[in-house]
Image (spheres, helix red, strand yellow):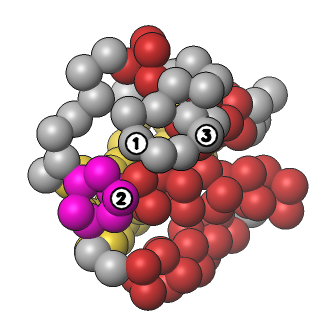
Amino acid sequence: MLTSLSKDKMNVVKEQDVVPFRNRVKEFTTKIGMGLVNQTKLITAASELARNMLRYGNGGTALIEVVSKERENGNRLTFADQGPGITNIALAMKDGYSTGKSLGLGLPETKRLVSVIGK
């Protein structure tokens, strides 16, 4: 069972909110003793998702948590916005796919960054 040990909810509604959000994510990674390389990966992924909330969802909220399962602690980030949503998640996770005017690399790279943390 996953248990939330501490959490903070932040509004990300303008570009200037991204840096304080990144800093708060760093604080939460430090709480669990995450190494610098993995901190950098998670913070980079969090920045990309926060910017996507701004770009495609007109901003939103991000929940940052320290979670525990048995004797292991980790971080969980949850993003929520009021955008139209992603109609085809599998397609959105492919390199080069974009519904906007971007390279279509953000979501796939974010997944790669967080998929390797802890392995």
Badge 3 element: loop
Badge 2 element: helix
- Residue at 54 percent of width and 55 percent of height: 48
Q: Give the left or right position of residue 11, taking residue 113 as reference.
A: left
Q: Is residue 40 visible?
A: yes
Mark-to-mark CA distance, 2 and 3? 14 Å
Among numbered discs 2 and 1, the one appearing first in the sequence: 2
Outermost front residue: 101
| Tag of residue 100 | 1
Q: Give the left or right position of residue 30, taking residue 4 as reference.
A: right
Indicate the position of residue 10 as horizontal and vertical percent values. Answer: 31, 74
Residue extent of the magenta highlight: 53-59
- Residue at 22 percent of width and 63 percent of height: 58
Mark-to-mark CA distance, 3 and 1? 9 Å
Indicate the amino acid at tag 2: Arg
Indicate the amino acid at tag 1: Gly
Q: Quarter of the image for the C terminus: give it.
A: top right
Report the residue marked by disc 3.
103
Mark 3 neighbour class, 10 Å CA radius: few under 14, some 14 to 19, many 20 or more? few
Indicate the position of residue 110 as horizontal and vertical percent values. Answer: 61, 40
Mark-to-mark CA distance, 2 and 1? 9 Å
- Residue at 42 percent of width and 79 percent of height: 15
- Residue at 64 percent of width and 61 percent of height: 43
Indicate the amino acid at tag 3: Leu
Report the residue marked by disc 2.
55
**Image marks 2 and 1: residues in contact by CB distance under 8 Å:** yes
Say which of 22 and 54 sits in front: 54
Which image quarter: residue 6?
bottom left
Badge 1 element: loop
Magenta stretch, main secondary structure class: helix
